[in-house]
Amino acid sequence: MPSRHLAPLLLSLLLGLPLAGLAQERQPLDRIVAVVNEGAIMASQLEERVDQARRQLGSRGIELPPEDVLREQVLDRLIVEEIQLQLARQANLSVDDTELNRQVRAIAEGNGMTLEQFADALEADGLSLGVMRDQVRRELLMRQLQQRRVGSRVSLSEREVDRFLEQQGGGMSREQARQALFQRKANDEMEAWLQEIRSEAFVDERLEPDA
């Protein structure tokens, strides 16, 4: 049951990103902007994700926050992702090629393209299908970890469902109420868990003020 409801919790950003936002432009000289336990986040990674965020927000007509605020927000997201990937490796989680191929095909279809057209579009934006597959694999690993760690925390009683239905005043089925309530509780647990793993990790941010 948890896997059915938790799968949409933190959908891959890739599903909503414009293709151009995934283009990777490496800086000639790289440096560490954050140490996360035994791992590190590089300035080039931060620049790529900041650029993706700009494109995504711009495509939605959302006003961009100040540059320093945006960079801090993106870096914090990268830190949390790195912590999750480390935990996934420690738990020996993996993504098989069949599931990976299915997800990549779904992203292509979501953009109204065949896999071949999608690969051509990625190439036109300077990104190979192989790089895209690596990014999707990362997202799937984090999803597996979230389902395992958060799913075990969420419990739902029939009395809670009854109370939720009463609060809604009708208009939905019992199954719809159960799913909605589960999603709400799962979101709360997800937020608490992310804060927990962030606080327990060793993090040394090295983001320069004027970077």
Image: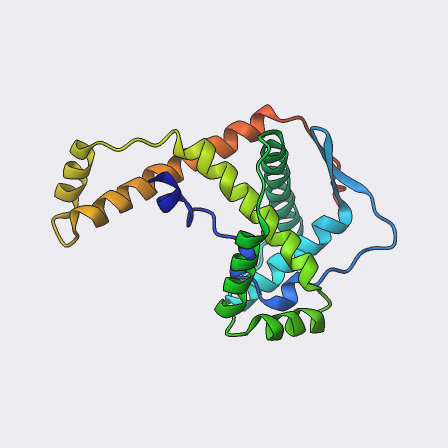
Q: How many marks?
A: 0
Q: Position of residue 94 (x, y in %)?
A: 58, 41
User: Residue, x 56% and y 43% (percent of image)?
Assistant: 141
Q: How is the image coloured?
A: rainbow
Near-viewer residue (30 or 109): 109
User: Residue, x 17% and y 52% (percent of image)?
Assistant: 172
- Quadrant of res 151: top left
> Does residue 44 sit above or below 186 in this rendering?
below
Residue 57 vs residue 211: left or right? left
> Does residue 192 sit above or below 7 in this rendering?
above
- Quadrant of res 63: bottom right
Q: Position of residue 158 (x, y in %)?
A: 18, 34
Query: Is residue 191 at all visible to an observer of this figure?
Result: no
Q: Position of residue 182 (x, y in %)?
A: 30, 40
Q: Position of residue 33 (x, y in %)?
A: 75, 40
Query: Is residue 171 at all visible to an observer of this figure?
Result: yes
Near-viewer residue (95 or 48): 95
Near-viewer residue (16 or 73): 16
User: Residue, x 66% and y 74% (percent of image)?
Assistant: 120
Residue 26 vs residue 54: left or right? right
The quadrant in which the N terminus is found is: top left
Residue 158 vs residue 182: left or right? left
Looking at the image, the residue that sits furthest to the right is 29
Near-viewer residue (68 or 180): 180
